[in-house]
Image (tube, rainbow, N blue to C red):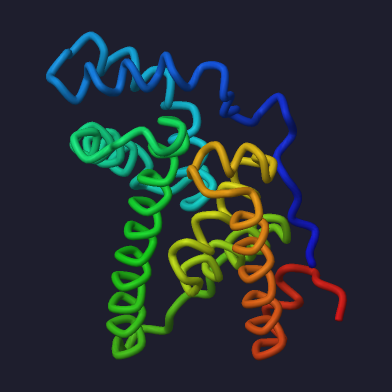
Amino acid sequence: MSRWAAAPPFMTPKVDAEDCQGLLALAQRAANGDDGAARELLQAVAPAMHRAIVGVLGTNHAEIDDVSQESMIGFLRALGAFRGECHPAGYAARIALHTALRARRRAKLERTRTDEIARLSPEEPSLPAAEPSAERRRNALRGLLEDLPPEQAETLALRVVLGWSLEEVAIATGAPINTVRSRVRLAKEALRRRLEEDPRLVEELEVES
């Protein structure tokens, strides 16, 4: 569909079924108030959370640290409702993804308000600096993720942003692999429809028509 590809393996936080039981035990202890277990669990899931946040917001976003903190707090608070249906790193990454997407929406709303104020200003607005094509493509995809149904956006982001295989996404979400495959397919179909409706996005993502 585009030149977007899974991240290189050496940059990709992995989910491994073999370490799942140990992390589930840590999650249970952390949910019961064990601070040491909570710290150890956060250290284990932090790479996946950080990669998800940076993938959605971009490396230079001003709110990365705040979103990371909010995501970690949200993850720890959500442990009480966590029943071990999926890998804890996947659970944490999904919380981070949704937190980052909310931050993008807030920032987008703020930019819209700022642009409206600038438009009404008598001063001549300055032109924004051109972004490199790779960054434009990433920003276009991030924007498209906001329009997908949550489960599809989440699955596609885990697949593309974190570079996880279908099997790893299944482990991360606790969903059957056929369900994961279906969600990815539906997400791609939705993105194709969106691209057909907006030719400018085809150019941004460098998708062949």
Residue shown at 30%/40% (left/top)?
71
Q: Quadrant of residue 179?
A: bottom right
128 relative to 181, above or below:
below
> Is 93 situated left or right of 195 in this image?
left
Residue 40 percent coordinates (x, y): 33, 12
The quarter in which the C terminus is drawn is bottom right
Residue 192 percent coordinates (x, y): 71, 78
The quarter in which the N terminus is drawn is bottom right
> Is 151 situated left or right of 67 in this image?
right
Residue shown at 30%/75% (left/top)?
114
Q: How many numbered discs?
A: 0
Name of the residue lying farthest toward the right: 208
Name of the residue lying farthest toward the left: 33
69 relative to 123, above or below:
above
Residue shown at 52%/68% (left/top)?
143
Residue 107 percent coordinates (x, y): 34, 63
Name of the residue lying farthest toward the top: 36
Residue toward you, 61 or 14: 14
> Is 172 situated left or right of 42 in this image?
right
Residue 57 percent coordinates (x, y): 46, 52
Residue shown at 34%/46% (left/top)?
63
205 relative to 37, above or below:
below
> Is 76 situated left or right of 49 in this image?
left
Residue toward you, 162 or 119: 162
Residue toward you, 105 or 59: 105
Q: Quadrant of residue 182?
A: bottom right
